[in-house]
Structures are given as structure tokens and as C-alpha cells.
Image: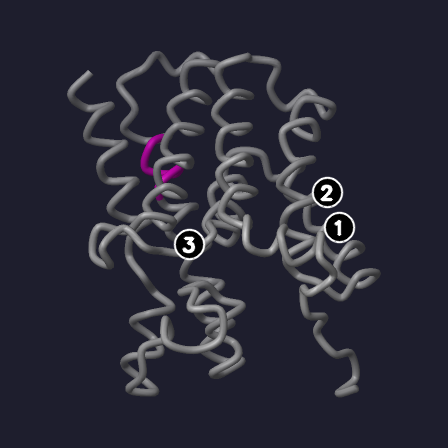
Amino acid sequence: MLRLVLILGLSYLLGSIPFGYLLVGIFRGEDVRRSGSGNIGATNVSRKSPALGAMTLLLDAAKGFLAVQLASRISPLPHDGVHLQRAMAAAGLFAIIGHMFPLWLGFHGGKGVATALGAFLRLAPQAVLIAVIIFAVVVLLSRRISLGSIITAALFPSTVWAMKLSNDPGVLFLIGLAALLIIARHHENIRRLLSGEEPRFSLGGK
């Protein structure tokens, strides 16, 4: 049990590393929380610098992946498939929570999309491939990244179940909880979407 608590604690601390905040602070000398949406994630960072936005996306995904990988290596639970999947899913969830509520920034963080991408890439890579396709289609049709994130998160648990990557209620619950948290963190975007005020991004510089 102590090792499991250690895994979850380390996963949270990994997730709480605010890469977007650090990168903008180091390379631009600015606080990314004071511009754009005020978010520390890749989308807002890219408004300052596309290159830093890409780095933020990769690093935020990497911390989710690493948390799940760590759980797969040192989990005290029996390595019999289901129990290991539960430990990995829990580690991914705590990494996402860490990104959303980072200790270092007064528990005010990002929305967890990139961290979830990395975590679930390690846990259920086939479902992530489908999720990326869904995200791309929604964003291209709507030109709203937030809508793509919300719909993809909402469909991800059922994608895992439909592809038979896990039929365990515990694993599906943890994945579903992560999806609900991501959707909840988009509450301001949802409000703007419903009122028609959510901005679209431009294609081809238009």
C-alpha cells in the first residue's frame, strides 16, 4: 500500500510541473497566466510562441506518459493485467490532477488535455489514435480546439470499452473520471460555446 501511495504521490508531483509557465518565464521573461486565456497549457503558450507551445505540448504529454510508465514498473499490485491496469490508470489520473491543480502555482493549473494524451498513450495507445482522429476532425470542422478537446474527452472512455482495451469497471471508472475532470475544466469554454462567443482559430492565415 505504501508503494501505491508513493506512485500516486509521484504521479501528482510529475503532473504538477508547470512546463508552460516555466518555458515562457525562461525564454520570454513573462508570466503566461497574464495573457490570453491565462492558462498554462500548450494552446495559450502557443499564442506567445508556437515553438514554446509545441515544447509545452510534448513535455506535458511526457509527464503523463512517465507517470503511467512508472506505475507499470513499480506497482505493488499483482501484475496480472487488470490490477496493473488499475494502478496505471490511477497514476495517469493523478498526473492529470497534478497538471490541473499544481502545488507550485497555488493549485491553479491547466486543463489536462496534453497530460491525458501522454498518460493514455501509455495505457491505451489504440484508443488514443482514434481520439486524435476525432479531435482533428472536430477541430477542422468547427475551428475550435476547445470543442475538439471536450468531445474527444467525452468519447474516450467509450472508445476504450468499445475497442475491448479494458472491460474492468475500475479502469473505466478512472478513465471516465479523468474525462469528466477535463470537461469540467473547460467550463468557461462550454459557456462561450453555448453563447456563440467561443473564438475560432484561423486557417491559412485568414
Q: Is residue 125 left or right of residue 129?
A: left
Question: Taken as a whole, is the magenta stretch helix, strand or loop?
Answer: helix
Which contiguous range is marked in magenta? 67-71
Marker disc for residue 18: none
Q: What element carries label 2?
A: helix
User: What amino acid type should be assigned to the residue bearing mark 1?
Assistant: Ile
Give residue 47's position: percent from left, percent from top.
Answer: 52, 79
Q: Residues within 10 Å of mark 2 (few under 14, many from 20)?
A: some
Q: Tell me the quarter of the image containing the C terminus.
A: bottom right
Rendered residue at 49%/83% (across/down): 49
First-in-chain label (2 vs 3): 3
Reply yes or no: does residue 69 show up in magenta: yes
Q: What residue did someone put label 3 on?
A: 62
User: What amino acid type should be assigned to the residue bearing mark 2?
Assistant: Ile
Q: Tell me the quarter of the image containing the N terminus.
A: top left
Marker disc for residue 130: 2
The answer to the question of whether label 1 and label 2 lie on touching residues, with beta carbons closer than 8 A, is yes
Marker disc for residue 133: 1
Q: Is residue 63 above or below residue 93?
A: below
Task: Give the CA separation, mark 1 to mark 3.
Answer: 20 Å
Rendered residue at 41%/61% (across/down): 59
Task: Give the CA separation, mark 1 to mark 2.
Answer: 5 Å
User: What amino acid type should be assigned to the residue bearing mark 3?
Assistant: Ala
Camera-side residue of 134 and 77: 134
